[in-house]
Image (cartoon, rainbow, N blue to C red):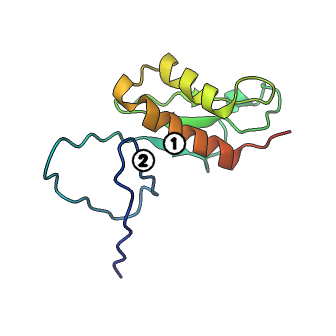
Amino acid sequence: GRTEVPTSRDIGDVVVFPSHVTHRVSPVTAGERHSLVLWVQLDAGPPASWAAEPAAACRPLEVQLPGGKSPILRWRPGGLSFEESARAFCEEHGVPDRHVESVVKQLTRTLRQNCELL
């Protein structure tokens, strides 16, 4: 069946949902809508190239960016915080300034949910 899930409409908020979920958006009646499509794959096995790396508290995350790039985000305890790592990732991979805050918010949340603090 259909279920409507109301979401926040505050500036800078991000709506995250599984890619298989059918969804729709309301028409824009004033201003502009900007969207950024970002995939974070957490359930795939690691590539063979990761086998030589030391064990990490967080499995490397493949982040699919618009344009087809899929860089890897790695986080290890003792280094940058989750948010600092997400910001550095955005800067390194050229995420447009207007999307940085949303991407940082989403990546920080993903790291918090999936990485073990030692």
Residue at image position (16%, 56%) is 27
Label located before the other in sequence (2 or 1) = 2
Q: Is residue 11 left or right of residue 44?
A: left
Q: Is residue 21 above or below residue 103?
A: below
Q: Name the residue type under label 2.
A: Val
**Which of 104 and 65 lies nearest the eye of the viewer?**
104
**Label 2: few (<14), some or many (≥20) within 10 Å?**
some
Q: Name the residue type under label 1.
A: Gln
Q: Is residue 75 above or below residue 14?
A: above
Q: Are marks 2 and 1 in contact (CB under 8 Å)?
A: yes
Query: Where does label 1 land, which residue?
Result: 106
Residue situated furthest right in the rendering: 118
Q: Is residue 72 left or right of residue 27?
A: right
Q: Position of residue 79 (x, y in %)?
A: 76, 23
Q: Position of residue 3 (x, y in %)?
A: 37, 76
The span from disc 2 to disc 1 (Cα, nearest Å) is 7 Å
Query: Where does label 2 land, which residue?
Result: 14
